[in-house]
Image: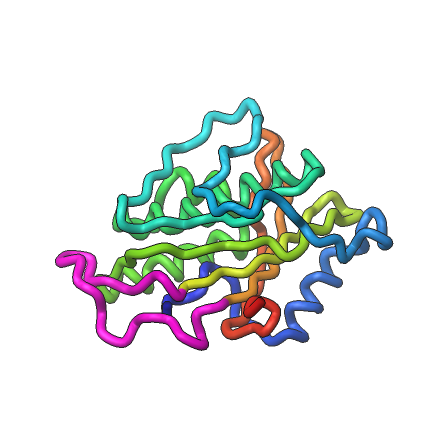
């Protein structure tokens, strides 16, 4: 679907690599390119990571679904990041349907540049009177733990089964369905806060990335 990519600056493949390098070296360079595998069946958002923090409510309408496929690993620490990453993605769409860029969930899961990008992204929908419907699928490509304590998550989204709608009427907006530009590659950075929540701090994206076609 020709939605705006989730809040991450648009980038070339080179810029994606630069962000990964800027995040610092991995704890184990031999595992830096480890691919994340999990159950083959599609599933809705994973449960948020087990921390003492009270989680804000996130809710999407029945006709709009984010499905996270193979969204897990055999590493509990990486799984905790992935769980909060999925909640971050849902929090952005939750804000679109609430009609405001000022929600507790956004402040809970995003900080810094990522939070500002989320605000701009959501306002883009609201200013045009748009929402969306259908199913967007997300698949993890790589999770890398960095020497500075941050974690980088690289993932793809497939928007071919979702589409832009008029927020008031719910009717599809003409020519908003996917096609060759329906796949988006994301390179995102997360840092754990004092409450044990993995918050997105920055990221870049590339629509039409070949890495997301398979």
Relative to 30, is 50 above or below? above
Where residue 48 appears, x then y in whole percent?
Answer: 51, 34
In the current view of this chain or complex, which residue is farthest to the top? 52
**Residue 144 colored in magenta in the image:** no
In the rendered image, the quadrant that contains the C terminus is bottom right
Residue 199, given in percent of the width and then of the height, sits at 56, 43
Name which residue lies at 63% across and 57% down.
141
Judge by depth and name the residue closer to the eye, 119 or 209.
209
Establish if 157 lies above or below 196: below
Residue 174 painted magenta = yes
Task: Give the quarter of the figure containing the N terminus.
Answer: bottom left
Q: Residue at x 18, y 57 (%)?
A: 170
Residue sitting nearer the eye, 127 or 206:
206
Query: Going by the image, does 67 lie left or right of 20?
Result: left
When the figure is inspected, residue 33 is found, relative to residue 180, above or below; the finding is above
Q: Does 33 sit left or right of 51 as displayed?
A: right
**How many numbered discs?**
0
- Residue beneath the point at 66% across and 42% down: 73
Q: Which quadrant holds residue 75?
A: top right
Q: Main secondary structure of the magenta part?
A: loop
Residue at the front extreme, as displayed:
40
Q: What x and y, as percent, mark residue 68?
A: 49, 48
25, 157: nearer the viewer: 157
**Residue at image x 47%, y 25%?**
54
Residue range of the region highlighted in magenta in the rendering: 160-183
Residue 126 spot, x, y in % from top left: 27, 59
On the rendered structure, is 38 left or right of 172?
Answer: right
Q: Could you say which is closer to the camera, residue 66 or residue 124?
A: 66
Q: Relative to 108, say whether 175 is above or below.
A: below
Colour setting: rainbow
Q: Residue furthest left?
A: 169
């Amino acid at each position: 679907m020709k939605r705006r990519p989730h809040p991450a600056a648009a980038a070339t493949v080179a810029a994606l690599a630069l962000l990964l390098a800027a995040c610092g070296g991995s704890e184990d360079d031999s595992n830096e390119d480890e691919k994340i595998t999990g159950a083959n069946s599609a599933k809705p958002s994973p449960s948020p990571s087990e921390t003492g923090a009270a989680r804000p409510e996130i809710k999407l309408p029945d006709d709009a679904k984010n499905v996270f496929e193979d969204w897990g690993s055999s590493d509990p620490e990486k799984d905790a990041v992935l769980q909060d990453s999925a909640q971050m993605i849902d929090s952005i769409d939750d804000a679109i349907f609430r009609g405001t860029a000022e929600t507790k969930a956004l402040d809970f899961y995003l900080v810094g540049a990522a939070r500002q990008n989320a605000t701009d992204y959501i306002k883009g929908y609201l200013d045009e009177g748009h929402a969306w419907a259908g199913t967007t699928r997300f698949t993890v490509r790589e999770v890398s733990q960095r020497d500075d304590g941050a974690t980088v998550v690289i993932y793809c989204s497939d928007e071919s089964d979702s589409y832009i709608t008029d927020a008031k009427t719910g009717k599809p907006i003409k020519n908003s369905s996917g096609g060759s530009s329906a796949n988006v590659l994301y390179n995102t950075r997360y840092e754990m806060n004092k409450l044990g929540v993995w918050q997105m701090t920055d990221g870049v994206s590339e629509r039409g990335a070949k890495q997301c076609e398979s």
